[in-house]
Image (cartoon, helix red, strand yellow):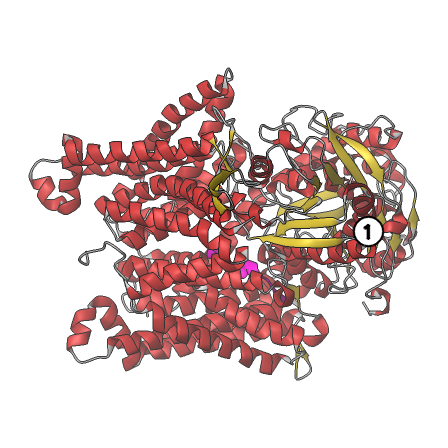
Amino acid sequence: MEFGPHLLLASLEGATTAAVLALTAMGLSIVFGVMRVVNVAHGEFYMVGAVLAWFIATSVGAHPALGFVAALLIAPLLVGFLAAGVDRLILRHINYDPERTIVATIGTLYILQQTTLMTFGPDARPVEPPFNSRIALPWFEWGENGFEFYFPWGLSTTSYKLFVIAAAVVILITLWLAITRTKAGLVMRATQQDSDMAQAFGIPVKTVYSAVFGLGAGLAAIGAVLVVPIQQAYYLMGHDPLLLSFIVVIIGGLGSLPGTIIAAILIGMADGIISVFFTPTLAKIFATLVVAMVLVFRPKGLLGKSTS
Amino acid sequence: MSDTSKSHGLHLGLICVLALAYFVLPAYHSGNLASVMVIAIYAMGYNLLFGYTGLLSLGHALFFSAGLYGLGLMMHLADWTPLPAFAAGLIAALVVSAVIGFLILRTTGVAFMIVTLMFAQAGYLTILYFGKYTRGDEGFALQQASRQIAGYDLTDPGVRYYCALVLFSVTLLGLAYIIRAPFGRTLVAIRENEERARMLGYNVTAIKLKAVIVSGVVSGASGATYALLFGYAGATFATVQYSIFPLLWVLVGGAGTTVGPFVGALFMFYLIDYASGKTEAYLLVVGVTLVLVTLFLPHGIVGTIRTRFLRWLP
Amino acid sequence: MSKLIKPTPTLTRRTLLGTAAAAAATPLLGRYAQAQSSEPIRIGFQVHRTGIGASYGRWYDRTTTAAVKRINDMGGINGRPVEIVAEDDGTDPKRGAEVVEKFATQHNCDIGFGTLFSHVVYGSAPRAGELKLPYFVVSEGHHVASGALNRWTMQPAITDVKSQVQAMAPFVADNLGKKVTMIYPDFAFGHDHRDYFSEAIEKQGGEVVAKIAIPPSETSFTKYFPKIPRDTEVIYHVMIGPAVLTFVKEMGEFFGPSKPEIFGFLDSLEAVDINSPGLEFLEGTYFWEGHPRYAQADQSSHDKMYREAVGVDENGASVSDPKDVATYSHMFGCWETLNIVKRGMEAADYKSTADRSKLIEAIEEMSDMPLSDDHPQGAKRFNGKTHQTFGHQYISKVDSGKLVLAHTSSIEDTLYEDEVDYTTQSF
């Protein structure tokens, strides 16, 4: 394939990756911002979201769109409650101590993974997309007859992938409005800035923490439900989203939600675009090192401000 | 008895118990203990950085595999004998930890975790990329015939056990010495209050770099020992999972204690071994145990004993 | 002196249940009575119950259980019942070595058996050699035949990847095309495919026009497809892991209506229903199969018997759950290995663990194995020097959502020069 179309194709792929990554990383970022803990089980909440989507879509049967919509509504909610439960039963009792939270969430990771293996099984299972048609894309060329459009071989995307990008944008805007314009958002921001002070003003900080932990996991689950018609539900699928979300959150700057979005776009797109120039594994090595070096020379991330 | 002589007693006592254990334990358990001692070296290396210096790395698998491949590739491709190959493993770990240490120490906290993780990930992919030599994920076996030192067959259960014990003891005593020495006390000072240490005139970054290098070389020594004694090197050991393991062992055993890493590694080994014999869902048992340990043993096993009962524990 | 203490064999709950069930199902227990010792023969089964190999592990387990039941129903081995001692290795090489150690020193097993993933084989085989435990792998890796392992490790029932790949080249060159683009995972298994196939297709006058190595744990593939040259006649794909559905789907979306010929290794789709949403694109493409998943029109009585014994229906799925698709191209190896072990133990007059080296020697003596109930996948030729077997390979075409056999390669197609002679190594 020629360079131009190849680059466009890789960018489109990168955009889909970035959209899902933005949702997942946003979940981690909110939890980190408000509660100051690293949730190692974040990827497993993503995985559980995908697996629940499969269960819901399969039991609804009927038209794939119906099952998908049901999954999109129910799965994140269930995952949110699950995470809030983990917060109440475990994290609250260790006072959100950073190191102990890491071990506790690693424990949670094993519990969720093994439970899924025993109920859902070891196979990867697909969910049917609500709609999915191939869209061939045009490319332009400055030829003998001047500027002309044509359809290069292989240059295409699917309607569902475009939908994922749009859905992620809508959800993130809604989230932004909720945080900045609603009372719940205000309470959350107050807790983020100073939990002791918030407590003093009568904000039920513990409940806020549970809700935030649930919200973070729910966002990961939304990302997973969106992605599961493209990929599949699989009990070990949480690993990569966890690592990538981590990277995104740090690169974006801890606690900076706009930073998280920018970093998700950068990293998602880079993943696609770098693959144009290098052999695949070399591209991964290169991308990993670039991100690491960004952090080495800008340890607080792109939009990070003061040390917390 | 002073606290210092008590801790000497503890370390030497542990080594003596381990030395005698070989004669008492059934073959299966002495074999396990050999492997736990090798792994505990890794955990002790990790503990120096995490438990004493307060730097939480998620990329130590890189140092472990530097040692593993340093020795493994030299024996596998260049037919080196074990001792020079072991030195190659240590040098590989030294070089890798010096370079990586130089870069990562510009970051702190969570950024430090992520950067170490990413360098380790790049290292893992590099091992795959050079699959022609490393055989990537599949790895390679070191032939039994080549694993001999001065006529001693390292694959013999007894030789292997005592070889592991010697290296374990050297590491345990060496690190115990370092921790009591001014260098070790400075590390703890940095962990407790980095700013104050800086104000007191310490070159904090240089000291932390030394800690990364010592920690990296000890981890590499563990990797090289594993390849030598168990005859296998593969990219699995460079995955994130093997970076998280030492963190778990140290946290479960007790961060910032000398014997905690060994106790943690031993505990986790037998937990998995026992649970997998009882149920297919052994990871569930592991997960629940981890949660319970964090809930009820906040300083790990040895750390809790220290806070509750034996204040002198090193 | 403590070494004199015999380790108490601890039974896992699972094996206990297994033996109890086998005993209950066997009215002919009396048969064992003639044997001098009715102490069971203990087979350590290293199984991938967790980790990336879990899909395979489940079916390896079912096949092994069925094979042992059949052997016990026929009177066991040398009059002794066979007992499986299963241990999960988590698909991890370090744990694999520990499990082998457990078989040898704690469970007092006669042999170790059943490993699939190559890195676990590499991690475990050195321990098996040191402990002098006969170790039978069902892995299809080239590790055994390459000489990298030891005299105690054998792969007697499943053809290795080098043979599989080279046996495909004549069919691909003659029927599909000569300009091949290879897409494979960027680790050892993929590199084996790359190297052996490139060599084999050149011998057929073809060439590999592009080699696209996909990094591990990649989940989106479209961005790599533009690297496929326009003049590609055949795409050769061998992807493993859960992302394979995405891979196929995105390949379909990339090519749209104008696709080249496509040839793949079914390793990609083991335990996956070929009729899963998104796999429609595979219609009309070809696959290597180790053992045809769908019962073919000319199905042998042996395949029929084997299928029933393991509990697989004519579509290659579990009889109790049609969505639960078998790893049919590999799991026959468990069944056949156990039968070979049985014959080996009988030939060696195997009595106790002291006879382990006699067992290895007896199997090294073996050569041709005809298609039979013991070998339902097909005839085989075992090479005692390289400890590797060679057998028929199958190529099927996806036709109306079923895999229909299109070509069976001969054993000769799979042969290559010996790279090792294990029989010269001492025990």
What x and y, as percent, mark residue B299?
Answer: 31, 57
Magenta segment: B232-242
Relative to C252, is B8 on the left or the right?
A: left
- Report which quarter residue A305 is drawn in: bottom left
Q: Residue at x 35, y 35 (%)?
A: A168
Whole-percent x and y of residue A3? Answer: 51, 51
Q: Residue at x 73, y 26 (%)?
A: C315
Give the residue number, with chain letter if any, for mark 1: C156
C191 or C390, which lies in front?
Answer: C191
Can residue B175 be seen here? The reply is yes
Residue C318 at x, y = what percent?
Answer: 69, 27
Q: Nearer the viewer, residue A85 or B204?
A: B204
Crowd tier of the residue under label 1, counting other residues whose Cα lies within 10 Å: few below 14, some 14–19, many 20 or above: many
- Is residue B44 rendered magenta in the image? no
Residue toward you, C192 or C158: C192
Magenta segment, prevailing SS (helix, strand or loop): helix
Marked residue chain, label 1: C
The image quarter containing residue A180 is top left
Asked whether the viewer can see residue B16, the reply is: no
